[in-house]
Amino acid sequence: MTGIVHDSVDSLAALIPDGSKIVVPADYTGIAMELTRAMVRRGVRDLYMVCLPVTGLQGDMLIGAGAVKTIETSAVTLGEFGGAPRFQAAIGDGSLHIKDATCPAIHAGIQAAQKGIPYMPLRGMIGSDVLANRDDWKVAQNPFSDEEDPIVLLPAIRPDFALIHAKKADRHGNIYIGIRREVMALAGASRQTLVTVEEIVDDNLLRDDETAAGTLPALYVGGVAEAKKGAWPLAFWDEYPADEAHMTSYVAAARSAEGFQDYLDQFVTGDARAAAAE
């Protein structure tokens, strides 16, 4: 596993080529915001971004930075902090291609890829506008029913990279994810998983009875780097809360292209991030 542990988050971001398909989890799972900032600094472009099943600040920042060409999601929202300003601006100017989905549909597509099968059946969408606008979703007759019983078939979603933030990793590349079992699905569906962690420990997490059951094995991991408070300004598990003041200031800044660029200059390409996160 030599080379799996990187000495910087920027070297981890360098693994993601332009045009990659990435998948990111919902905020409560663990968002790799430090990796997101490194991707913006690198200037990555033309990403296909899958959100399991929604995104917030991470998606808004990548979209605002011009990194995302296509997004597949059921929502882009900053929750209690309001709408996602750069996502809304991209919708307005037509610079972003949206593949509208539902939460169960994205989970089903990821599960299909995890299982190595080409599609997953799902009920509940027939007659909806979402289905009407997805020509890659097919309606078929249930082969096990003698009566008319249409069901939707959803293609497997096979990302190039899953991006997550976790509590800790060991030097073998094993990642402690605790109860966040959805990370297992993300990792199983993706070709590689890139991870930032609060700390890298010397102990083998798979050999410890206290951590083994909640550990993602290194065979799923393409790279890991230490990033203390790497989910900031978002909350991370019970480790630290969201930085509400910073989130409020982000929304205010990101309402305009100029304000968003000033934000990037200060907190992404500048040196203000470390001081603000402390």
Image (tube, rainbow, N blue to C red):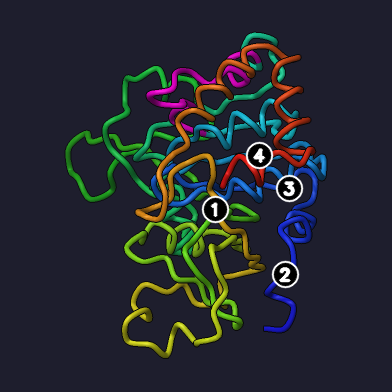
Q: Which residue is drawn at 50% across and 32% down?
A: 56
Percent x, y of residue 276: 61, 39
Instruction: Count all numbered tags in the image, as a single digit.
Output: 4
* Left or right: 174 as drawn, with respect to 215: right
Q: Which amino acid does label 4 sit on?
A: Tyr
Q: In this view, does 74 lie above or below 203?
A: above
Packing grade of label 3 (10 A; few <14, some 14-19, many >=20) is: many
Q: Residues within 10 Å of mark 1 (few under 14, many from 20)?
A: many
Mark drawn on residue 38: 3
Q: Mark number for residue 48?
A: 4
- Provide residue 201's location: percent of width, then percent of height: 54, 79
- Residue at 22% of width from left, 33% of height from top? 148
Q: Earlier in the sequence, mark 3 or mark 2?
A: 2
**Among the 4 quarters of the image, the one containing residue 94:** top right
Task: Please state the extent of the stretch shown in magenta in the rendering.
Answer: 73-89
From the top left corner, tell me how far across and down residue 122 is, in percent. Answer: 32, 41
Where does label 2 land, which residue?
6
Q: Which of the labelled discs sits on residue 229, or is there none? A: 1
Secondary structure at badge 4 equals strand
Marks 1,4: beta carbons within 8 A: no
Q: State which quadrant residue 106 falls in.
A: top left
The vertical placement of 203 against 40, above or below, is below
Membership of 169 in magenta stretch: no
The local secondary structure at tag 2 comes to strand
Q: Position of residue 193 (x, y in %)?
A: 59, 62
How far separated are the C-alphas under marks 3 and 1?
14 Å
Cα–Cα span, label 3 and label 2:
13 Å
What residue do we see at 42% from left, 50% from top? 240
Q: Which of marks 3 and 1 is in front?
A: 1
Quarter of the picture holding the N terminus: bottom right
Q: Residues within 10 Å of mark 2 (few under 14, many from 20)?
A: some
